[in-house]
Image (cartoon, rainbow, N blue to C red):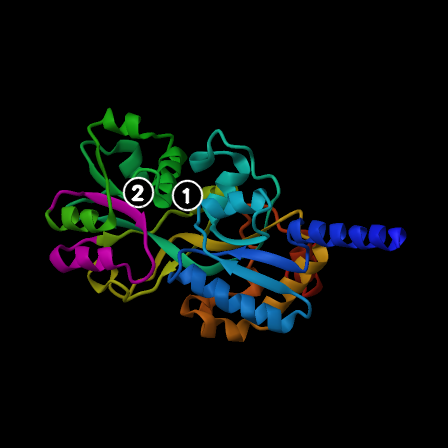
Amino acid sequence: MFKRMIAAAGMAAALVAGAMAPATAQTVEWRGGSIGGGWYTIVSGAAKLLEDKVPGLTIKAVPGGGAANPVAVQQGQAQLAMSIDIFASMAATGTGTYQGRPLADKLRMIGQSFGDTPYHFIRAPGQTMDIPTLFREGRNIRFGGANNGATDEIALRWLLAVYGQTYDSLRARGWRFQLAAYGDLASAYRDGQLDYAFFALGLPGSAVVDMATGRDGELLDIPQDVMDAFKQRHGMGSGVIPGGTYPRFHGNREVKTLVMATTLVTSTDVSEDIVYKITKAICENVAELPRIHGSLKDYRCETAIANRPVPVHPGALRYYRERGWVQG
């Protein structure tokens, strides 16, 4: 009797320990965005797809946020998460938003471009300088950018750094910066208070449409050397704003630009086997992704790790190599 009681107690303890243990490789938590937003919709739908395609896999879709999600993965609170390429890069290097925080050294990527957001560099009528000349020689410029600390405002600082500039160095040449909400930037532009502006918005960006309703202007191509520098330093990709998106600003001309890419991240604590299965299931069912969310229509596994803000997880890399999309 006593032996049976000991055995029963041992079994109970094991069950309790199992209940309190962190998620296993077969049960994962996937952080998205705010409930009702695009990321949460993507995560909820993709979780159902993966559960259907990967036997034994259980995914809990939960709300999250672009800046918080890499930290949740690093700390083991989530095993999958949506993020932005530059947030992932900053978390892994302890820079920008994550200055002074522990490095997210466990952070790994599965793929990116689950819906991209292009940058817009707008030149007002009457201004003639291209981007390199502007930053190297421009004086008394009124420049608009996103709110201080926003993802695209951080990218603006990086852009200045490519040309060896800072806010202070440009202010010394008479520059005035207006860092504000997109709607406020649109109003300032329409009212003739801005000469140039730089920020990221999905297409078509309502603030850019608003700008174009009241004032002419031009969307500028981002120089290739800038895009190369952003790719090398921050793992950021490039793309185009299709012709006709904002007829008053660029007619039918394609505009070459930087792209802020949504990145699916995971942790080194998640097994190679489970990440391999997740990657395989996504890539073998790409045609189903747009039914989950329209922004997924352009996702391509062949180029999913062309830009790498953080290292690729070995499980994902194994699948891409098997398909011949990655050499070595």
Q: Which contiguous range is marked in magenta?
A: 192-217
Tell me if residue 283 can be seen.
no
Q: Which residue is mark 1?
A: 226
Under circle 1, the secondary element is: helix
Which residue is painted at 88% across and 51% down in the image?
2
Q: Determine crowd level at label 2: few under 14, some 14-19, many 20+ residues with C-alpha closer than 10 A.
A: some
Q: Amino acid at mark 1?
A: Val
Which residue is painted at 49% across and 62% down in the image?
43
Of mark 2 and mark 1, the one earlier in the sequence is 2
Q: Do the residues under discs 2 and 1 have CB atoms within 8 angstroms? A: yes
Under circle 2, the secondary element is: helix
Would you identify the image quadrant in which residue 92 lies?
Answer: top right
- Residue furthest to the front: 1
Which residue is painted at 63% across and 72% down in the image?
53
Which one is nearer the viewer's eye here, 226 or 187? 187
Above/below status of 291 relative to 138? below
322 lies left or right of 154: right
Number of dots carrying numbers: 2
- Point out residue 106 in the picture as x, y percentages from the top left corner: 62, 42
Q: Quarter holding the N terminus? A: bottom right
Above/below status of 140 relative to 115? above
Which one is nearer the viewer's eye here, 301 or 42? 42
Magenta residue check for 193: yes
Res 300 label: none
Q: Amino acid at mark 2?
A: Ile
Res 131 label: 2
166 lies left or right of 72: left
- Point out residue 74 in the picture as x, y percentages from the top left corner: 58, 43
- Point out residue 217 in the picture as x, y percentages from the top left corner: 19, 53
Tell me if residue 55 can be seen.
yes
